[in-house]
Image (spheres, rainbow, N blue to C red):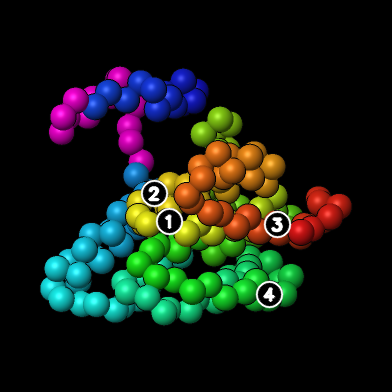
């Protein structure tokens, strides 16, 4: 019944005022940590810090350069023991590296179903995109945070097509092997 209140086009912004229809509310969870990372990085730069790596749990903000980040599927074992492995190294320089997925903030039901925290706004149900996670590298944490969550909900094919349209931002969808999937990539 609440799906009738889901429509970003009905959010009206005028200057610093945001107006919503009756029954609607905003949830900024998909951009909150990214925005906080941007503000923290800005405060550190203004304080004279030239090199730092901020870890906000799934959101990493790099100040300066030469920071190596390992991309891995390590958190998956918290929800399902499928093993984990490294995907590679990323050299981060003055950017945000944001990962969204249902591999950490989740629980496994008695029937083995994994329930995560990311909802699909089209269905109102938990996102079941077949992806383990999506990692985005962006200049701004808030942009990377919004994109990683959105692309995770879209699933691999829609996310890949959408990411190609973006140009400057890159995404790395990771497909989680699951008994419902016949192939994994």
**Secondary structure state at the residue bearing disc 2:** helix
Kind of element beneath mark 3: strand
Residue 172 in the image: state x and y as whole percent.
60, 57
The answer to which quarter of the image holds residue 96 is bottom left
Q: Secondary structure at mark 1?
A: strand
167, above or below 81, in the image: above
Magenta stretch: residue 158 in it? no
Mark 3 and mark 1 lie on one chain; the one further toward the N terminus is: 1
Q: Earlier in the sequence, mark 4 or mark 3?
A: 4
For label 4, the residue is 84
Which numbered disc, 4 or 1, marks the residue closer to the eye? 1
Which mark, by number, is residue 175?
Answer: 3
Q: Is residue 17 magenta?
A: yes
Per the rendering, the mark at residue 143 is 2
Mark whose residue sits in front, 3 or 1: 1
In 3D space, how far apart are the residues under numbered discs 3 and 1 (Cα atoms)? 21 Å
Q: Residue 23 got which mark?
A: none
How far, Cα to Cα, is label 4 from label 3?
Answer: 12 Å
**Residue 131 visible in the shown view:** yes
Looking at the image, do the residues carrying marks 2 and 1 touch, with CB atoms under 8 Å apart? yes
Under circle 4, the secondary element is loop
Give the mark toward the camera: 2 or 1: 1
Can residue 54 be seen in the rendering of this structure?
Answer: no
Task: Give the main secondary structure of the magenta stretch.
Answer: loop
Residue, disc 1: 138
Q: CA distance from mark 4 to mark 2?
A: 28 Å
Q: Are marks 2 and 3 in contact (CB under 8 Å)?
A: no
Using the rendered view, name the quadrant where residue 113 is placed: bottom right
Over which residues does the magenta segment extend? 14-27
């Amino acid at each position: 019944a609440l799906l009738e209140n889901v429509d970003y086009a009905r959010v009206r912004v005028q200057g610093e005022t945001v107006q919503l229809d009756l029954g609607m509310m905003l949830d900024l969870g998909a951009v909150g940590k990214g925005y906080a990372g941007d503000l923290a990085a800005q405060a550190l730069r203004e304080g004279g810090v030239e090199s730092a790596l901020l870890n906000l749990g799934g959101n990493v903000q790099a100040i300066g350069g030469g920071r190596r980040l390992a991309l891995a599927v390590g958190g998956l074992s918290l929800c399902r023991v499928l093993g984990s492995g490294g995907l590679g190294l990323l050299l981060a320089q003055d950017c945000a590296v944001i990962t969204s997925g249902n591999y950490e903030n989740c629980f496994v039901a008695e029937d083995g179903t994994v329930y995560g925290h990311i909802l699909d706004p089209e269905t109102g149900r938990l996102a079941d995109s077949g992806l383990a996670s999506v990692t985005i590298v962006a200049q701004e944490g808030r942009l990377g945070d919004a994109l990683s969550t959105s692309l995770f909900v879209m699933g691999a094919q829609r996310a890949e097509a959408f990411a190609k349209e973006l140009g400057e931002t890159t995404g790395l969808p990771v497909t989680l092997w699951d008994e419902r999937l016949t192939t994994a990539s």
